[in-house]
Image (cartoon, rainbow, N blue to C red):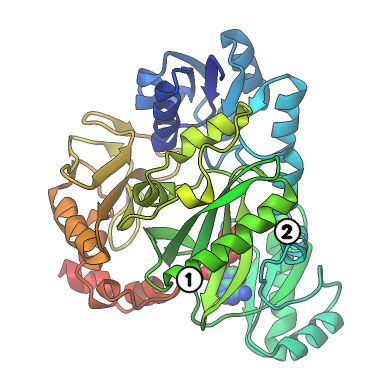
Amino acid sequence: MFDKILIANRGEIALRILRAAKELGISTVAVHSTADSEAMHVKLADESVCVGPPSARDSYLNIPALLAACEITGAEALHPGYGFLAENARFAEILADHHIVFVGPKAEHIRMMGDKIEAKRTVKELGIPCVPGSDGAISGDHEAAAVARELGYPVIVKASAGGGGRGMKVARSQSELSVALATARLEAKTAFGDDAVYLEKFLEKPRHIEVQILGDGRGKAIHLGERECSLQRRHQKVWEESPSPALNASQRGHIGEVCASAMRKLGYVGLGTIEFLYEDGQFYFIEMNTRIQVEHPVTEMITGVDLVNEQIKIAAGSPLSLTQEQVIFHGHAIECRINAEHPATFRPSPGEIAYYHPPGGLGVRVDSAVYAGYVIPPTYDSLVGKLIVHGRTRNEALMRLRRSLDEFIIDGIDTTIPLFQTLVRNADIQNALYDIHWLEKFLATGGMDIAAA
Ligand code: ADP
């Protein structure tokens, strides 16, 4: 096992990794920008190194500064968390060149899954069901029109290098197709420096269901069930749960095994998430994330498996600590991502937290790095914390969520807690009757304005 690990992240995920490392008896190094010197992850780590000014580009994404921090402190491994450098294959290679262990998959797998065309081609060969679409990149309007005719409208143009919902355009008819192609290309070129795009059938009412997998790179891989993340705003997940209310045990076992088997064939190392759209009983692969995800706690709550602990142990060369048969699902878990934003307008609300009182009690977990007196800087994302509840049934989890939200006090800034207080009382949510467009429609039709009135 490692003696010392450097955590190349901030906020709640830095704290999450720090906790796992401490439980494994590993000494921790925090890095931070000048804007984060008072941050909780810095206070709780054994050592800390300032890696640059507030701008993430010059601090959390500053590879030479991170290498220097490893060198100065003698850290043998680096955990990237999510975001920042977590899915940067070149960074993983640079660390390997410096004999620092990257807590994550092989660089070749990060690169493969970062290119959506390549990812889709690979997983399809490994037996994972995909959205019908073009075979690779589309070269011109003519080819696009022919593929779209075959798929049937509507279709979606997607950037191969895409991420964060950028470089995607829907075309509902042939007349919309060339504009969709041109805009998606332009957006992709501007955002990612790569204008390769491909075409997929556009699914009208899918749910978002993703499978958590864990591999040891030596031919073993298991799945830890699925998470449903259909409640999204601007392609950002807002509310996540496990298990998905849309699946039964046999469907779960089936898609889980399809994914685990694919990862065994690939020789995948560490944690990964295989994301699907799910419509009319069918799964359609959209992408694979090669890192720990924001919503991982719901899986931990129903399996009792510490995913970050597993990640670190596998990176240190240990075999998987459990078999598929030892993964047992208990009850139901729900996570709400609480942001420093106005609950109806979503205007960011950085500033000082005047008073902070998190909820507690049976089945309640709060993953957050804030405290009373902490000033949320305007520089980074607006996640204040995650409220995760667990119950024996979905209904029990919903009741627990309702009372936990009512207990949660964060004064001094706006937060999205009132949004969740409204959602948890909504009949569609209670009956799990939603798809990936539900939340946008709810907000567009004044769902929160009515609640605020
Ligand atoms: P990104 O990496 O930019 O997040 P994804 O491929 O994961 O892109 O897609 C993001 C979201 O876009 C999905 O969660 C879904 O809401 C929508 N989407 C993507 N592909 C399709 C499709 N074929 N049909 C309908 N919606 C889609």
* Element under disc 2: helix
- Is 5 left or right of 329, judged from the image as shown? right
| Side of 224 relative to 443 (left or right) | right
Coordinates of residue 86 in the picture (x, y in percent): 60, 39
Q: Estimate the x, y position of residue 260 in percent, counting from the top left.
A: 61, 55
Of label 2 and label 1, which has the lower sequence position?
A: 2
Q: Which residue is mark 2?
A: 119
- Label 2, label 1: how far apart the Cα atoms are: 26 Å
Up the image or down, 103 lies above or below 258; here it is above
Q: Quadrant of residue 244?
A: bottom left
Q: Is residue 317 above or below residue 265?
A: above
The image quadrant where one finds ligand 1 is bottom right
Q: Label 1 amino acid?
A: Ser
Residue 100 seen in this snapshot = yes
Side of 232 relative to 114 (left or right): left
Find disc 1 in the rendering and name its residue: 250
- Amino acid type at mark 2: Ala
Which residue is at a point 47% across and 64% down the rendered structure image? 234
